[in-house]
Amino acid sequence: MKPSILILSLAACAILVANPVNIERIVVTDTSSDNDQLIADNNQTSGKQTFTTKSIAALSTQANMNPYTVIAFSPSVNFTPVDQAGSNEPSYHDPIRIRGKSQSGPGGVFMIDGMPISSNPGGGKEMLDMENVSSIDLHKGYLPVDKNLGFSSLIGKVDMNLLSARAKAGAEVSQSFGSDDFMRTFVRFDSGKIGDVAVFGSFSQLTNDKTKGEGDLKRLNGTVGLTYQPNNSFKAKVTAITNSDDHHNYYNLSYAESQNLGVNFNKDYATTKPTASNDVNYYDWNKQHFNTMALLGEIEYRPSSSDVISIKPYYKKDKGDYWYSSVSPDGNASKNRVINWEIDHDLFGSIAAEKHTFSEALKTKIGYWYHKQLPPGPPSDQEKYKVVNGSLVFDGYAVLADNDYHVLQAPFVEASGSLDNFTYVAGLQYQTFKMGSLQSHTLNNQTGAANPDYDTAIATTNADALASVDAKTFKTWIPSLYLGYAFSPSTSAYIDYSRTYGIDVNLFPTYVSNRANFATKASLQQLWDKLDLELSDNIDVGMKTTMGGITLNPLLFVSFVQNKQANVFDPQYSIAYPANVGDALGYGAEFSAYGPINENLELLVALSYNQYKFTQNFASNATTTVNTDGKQLPDAPEYMAKAALSYHLGDWTFTPSARYSSSRWGDVQNTQKVDAYTVVDFDMAYHIAEFMGSHNALLRLTATNLTNEKYIATINAVDNYLVATGSPTTYQTGAPLGLYGSINLKF
């Protein structure tokens, strides 16, 4: 959609009126019905956890843009952003782990309406305002075949269900403000149903200074949605989303610095330009800017009462740059550079499915998924700049490549049903996963590589045959199975299994940065041919019972991971490189309890125990083996506990909450330990029936990190690196005490 069309659409919507999201009580549901029965609709299972509109309002931060801040209250979910906006994280990966696992490759964790629209690196991570989300589905272990999509699904999926155009006209206006000049404005208008059409439009703007050091954050979101439903047999929806994201990065501590937070908690980049050559420690050389546009569609046709045909096309365009300081690991300042990782890529695809109901005992689904996305992942355009007299001077390319599209496609089938107290879902996907070919042009500072224009540099340089590769295709069966049994209306048990997948794409940049050594021993194609798809076979066994108003959900899980990438020594070529040679084991236990204790008090508790580790040692050179067998992988706390309690007193709601994480490791050899921490927040809300012309208003005051805890929030660690081969782990501190207020009006 052209920007002019989007602006006109928003302007047209601005004369209309809407019904907003309201914060009332914390409500977390499983995939069962509202009365916590084992599901009657076999398209849903107890293998997912759903956070409702009320949950989103109560658990989302004042930024209200990141779904991970909501699901962070689920067991085994480790997400701790580095600022109170919940949005200022590295561009190159999703800083979230689920059951100890991190996402691999250029795949994103979140989906929108079941479409795998997110990717890494790049922008668009917070392109959807939470006020436009009706619920969030968290899939941790079990993934049904039509959700097991995208470049990677290793750790599960976070599926945001859009709040479509409402049938009734209305409007919502929200204004927030707080610490570090935090300011957020959100406006949504709904036309209501006009004939067969309903339209909504929303706009938000967020600005915030960094909580430490110099720099700021500015994010603009615009969303327009249209629903067309002429009858009960046909419905079509289209949604357009735009996102602009500008922000400065936070400083990355070394491990030594992370061990003295009394001194280094507020450490950040220099606020004035350095004068020494190749001193890259300056805040304005560490920043990101991205513009993202997404289009999502859905067509649903019901030719009979037993059949549903659906088509979901999607498209995303992402363009921007990511500037960061690259410091030589050997301490040689003459090698220090500022990198500009320019990103210009898109992805598109479609999911088509046909559902048929034979009976309650047998429902079938058959479908096809097609997905195509352009790198980076691996990178194609990373410019180097050296610092001369306080200014940046172009110094060639760290990476210059011409990359082809990655293409994934899969037919899938599913059978489900319920018979008496028994429920089942069995699915199978046959996936063809093609990693695109790439031609490297990063060689000997060729003449064209002296030009910072990417197209010119590609056109005027030759490809490097030793560092270029052909497309590589993986073909894999992706099965899933869910079995549930209801012992009574209040107690059920289930077991489920699914296979998830992914692959890291860091072999190419590793080869390019070490080409002088690698090329004398092996071509990239020889190493590329050894790549394999990482697979995880996941099993959950759980039960759910309701006692009074409280639902209890204990769960045991295990994951068997094969072909996990590790940076290890290969005796065939006498070099160390990222190779798919690792086996890993994950297992643990989860417990959640949620629901009303009485009419005034509501509870949410989430406890988890996680183990995630390699099951063998690795060679770091021809004579040395590094001890990794049985060691916990980085940034994977063994114990986590989260709790929130909402107390309702008349028009007031008081919600204290706390999140605890046990100690973590910054490396796979478990030599860099990070201390445990507890973060406490407090939220107070006041409801007014009529205020400033609205029919409902909500005033809210929030304190985050109430005890001003000094802790490490994000560990930027790579599972596959060993200290012996140069671990790149860095550490970022969490946000200090913050105070925020907001007013939400609905008309």
Image: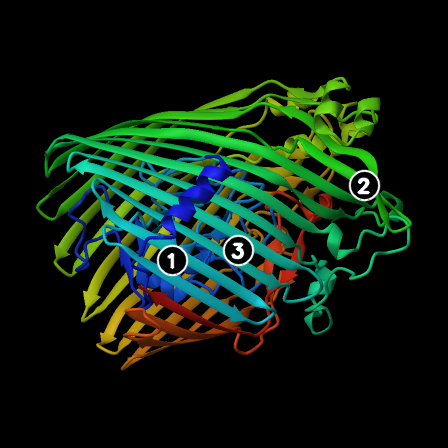
At x 40% / y 65%, what residue is drawn?
59
- Which residue has dot 3 on it? 636
Residue nearest the viewer, comparing 354 with 718: 354
Q: Residues within 10 Å of mark 3 (few under 14, many from 20)?
A: many
Residue 277 in the image: above or below residue 429: below
Could you say where residue 542 lies in the image, as x and y percent from the top left? 28, 54
Could you say where residue 128 lies in the image, as x and y percent from the top left? 44, 50
Q: Residues within 10 Å of mark 2 (few under 14, many from 20)?
A: many
Eye-nearest disc, 3 or 1: 3
Q: Secondary structure at mark 2?
A: strand
Residue nearest the viewer, comparing 12 with 346: 12
Marks 3 and 2 in Cβ contact (< 8 Å): no
Q: Secondary structure at mark 3?
A: loop
Quadrant housing residue 225: top left
- Which residue has dot 2 on it? 385
Horizontal side, residue 21 vs residue 386: left or right: left
Residue 605 in the image: above or below residue 96: below
Q: Secondary structure at mark 1?
A: strand
Tell me the amino acid under the disc marked 3.
Ala
Q: Quadrant of the N terminus?
A: top left
Horizontal side, residue 671 vs residue 408: left or right: right
Mark nearer the N terminus (3 vs 1): 1
